[in-house]
Image: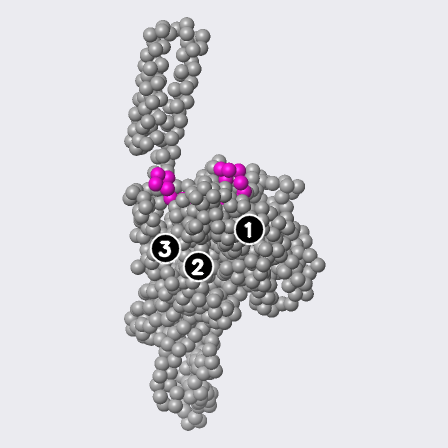
Amino acid sequence: MSGVSPLASPASCSVSVCVFAVTVAVMSVDLGSEWMKMAIVKPGVPMEIVLNKESRRKTPIAVCLKETERLFGDNALAMSVKNPKTVYRHLQSLLGKKHENLQVALYRKRFPEHQLQEDPERGTVYFRNSDFSSHILEMQYSPEELLGMVLNYSRGLSQDFAEQPIKDAVITVPAFFNQAERRAVLQAAQMGGVKVLQLINDNTAVALNYGVFRRKDIDSTAKNVMFYDMGSGSTTATIVTYQTVKTKESGTQPQLQIRGVGFDRELGGFEMDLRLRDHLAQLFNAQKKSEKDVRENHRAMAKLLKEAQRLKTVLSANMEFMAQVEGLMDDIDFKAKVSRSDFEDLCGDLFERVPGPVQDALATAEMKLDEIEQVILVGGATRVPKVQEVLLKAVEKEELGKNINADEAAAMGAVYQAAALSKAFKVKPFLVRDAAVFPIQVEFTRDAEEDGLKSLKRNRRILFQRMAPYPQRKVITFNRYNDDFSFDINYGDLSFLSQHDLSVFGSLNLTTVKLSGVGSSFHKHEDAESKGIKAHFNMDESGVLLLDRVESVFETIVEEKEEESTLTKLGNTISTLFGGGSSEPAPNVTEPVQDEEEVPPESGKDDKDEVQKEEAAEEKPDDSEKSEKTEEKVNMSLPLKEEKDEEKSENAEAEKDVEEKKAKPQKKAKISEEITVELIINDVSDLTADEVTSSKKKLQDLTNRDLAKHEREKMLNNLEAFIFETQDKLYQDDYQLVLSEEEKEQISAKLSEASEWMDEDGYSLPVTVGCHLKVTGSLCVS
């Protein structure tokens, strides 16, 4: 490696980011429910928000599928008021959801223009629009595929802004996303051609961004900060502890630890927009300018939603405002005055829910309000004055913190993490201890006997407690099985969720794990001592639970060779040097994984007693064995008087051998046999490899069509420019001198012919005529 060059001076950024000579840019995507923000790190640019094609710092999450092209971002959003059924938005709420989920019903209510159908294979939903003649657009599109298009678009924007290829990204997700939702985002990224370095919780990304710019203020004294994030679709309150800790690898470093999380999945700015939209619709109907109900016109309601969003922003700074929409329906204009008090009355029940996440976060962290030093606002919806008023009263503070960028903090924190994870960059360490919001446990059934009656007993062991830190590895040992069996991985105690949240959450059963080959492993190693069936789990950096492997572990005694004489050792050494006779290690002998944590048994008293008995049986020697050894020792140390001298000598030598053997501890070796695992997904099935490949091809076909259209338009634009330029040159003095009148007339005629052809047929011709465009251009100068 050559030297290291800084990307930013301390004056411009308190984060020291360095890059090696061979560099690759990385990106982050703050994936909200309505908007996304991208940031990049590249050589010479430490951390910067990506500007889209309209030079805006945030981009709507919207996809428009037209007959001839796709539109994204602001262009797609503009189409929502012209043809709402072609524009797909707010996809986040559909990820990892079954068809019968209440979130799907809510989506149908909010966007009645879309046809949501059930996927017969997975039980999820997909969009279908049969209004188009194109065979590509007639296909069904899952939320993952549409999100994959959005992520691919975000990658394209980031590459254009960075002026170099980008593939690696850190993507933010809500902290309350469960396993199915996280896997859905990962598959969407895979379809979109984005390599995910990590899914980071958006609250953690915000906390990281806050911490890296205040590194000097963090010391060994714990400092608790609450981040209150109200975005478009949801609200999250997070308690974070900052302090320095000592590590073996890098010494004393700052660390953030997620201590408590509270959330409301449906409390956000978009619900306020919908309340205002419905109020405007009611006002329009009350004016009786049309006999039709405006609420039945999807296009008119889309226009009212756009005006409601503008109105909410204006009312944050003004007490009243005149809402107006030209040509709302049947060429009828709409105008009505709306006050801030009207808005607050419409959303009164929403404002009552503002303190809920704060209380839940405090309860999770087992803290009181006076332990929180500061409450910091995040998210666009926190700009609503009533939200701030209610929140300030709930947290009992003098003021609310507004010292971070409420819109961009998550994107900036995520891109710092992307640089830290990338091999191409070097950043100052900032330790992050994220926490799993939902507990996960393992459940299994085994034979039990009570009062002489045999029965099946359901047992459970907590794999990850609520708010357990991750990434983390765990191992569970099953001691009572010697044949094939199965166990379930489920969510643990979710009593902290409301009944509504539970109904939205989805299946509480994650995976059924079926093991085969257990019995054969016991037959294969019947002379060895079983140490149980060990299942190794890993909750990775993205908060996704993985089953790494399952193995049957045995322990056997390895007989040591008698100690050789010095001459023999020397001879063996020389023989090895010249003969190369190295010994191979025993197959399947493994060392225990050092960084794994053994999960302790859970449940009731009976289980604990059984475990204690097992441990006692393993650790304590048998009493009879002990007495036999004692008796043997006594007999050897006290021989009978009538024995002959030879017998005394033999007994003395035997006693010496026994003592030497006892003095040497027996060497034990562990043997592991891999167990075949079959996973049955119980929450939401992932797309198969073939389905992912098919989705990639579907998206690539659309991309190729978009590129071909762009190329055709580029050719036509070039041809049009050539025609105008050549026509102008015909009347310039330099060309007048070298061209005859006949030549000028011929060229002018060909230019006119090409212009007419382009106006009549050029923009409607298929892609294959691209070559003809070049021919036409050449004819004009022949």
Q: Which residues are magenta?
A: 52-69
For residue 523, say whether it is visible: yes
Residue at left offset 59%, top offset 55% = 342
Query: 753 above or below 218?
Result: above
Task: Give the farthest residue toward the right.
Answer: 398
Q: Are marks 2 and 1 in contact (CB under 8 Å)?
A: no
Image location (x, y in percent) of residue 253: 61, 55
Read off the residue under disc 3: 116
Nearer-N-terminus badge (1/3): 3
Front position in the image: 26 or 660: 26
Q: Is residue 627 left or right of residue 206?
A: left
Task: Give the farthest residue toward the bottom.
Answer: 642
Question: Which quadrant holds the C terminus?
Answer: top left
Read off the residue under disc 2: 106
Q: Residues within 10 Å of mark 2 (few under 14, many from 20)?
A: some
Name the residue type under label 3. Leu
Image location (x, y in percent) of residue 25: 49, 41
Which SS does the magenta portion mostly show? loop
Residue at left offset 41%, top offset 82% = 654
Read off the residue under disc 1: 410
Kindly state the secondary structure of the residue where label 2 is placed.
Answer: helix
As measured in the structure, the alpha-carbon distance from the residue carrying label 1 to the one carrying label 3 is 31 Å
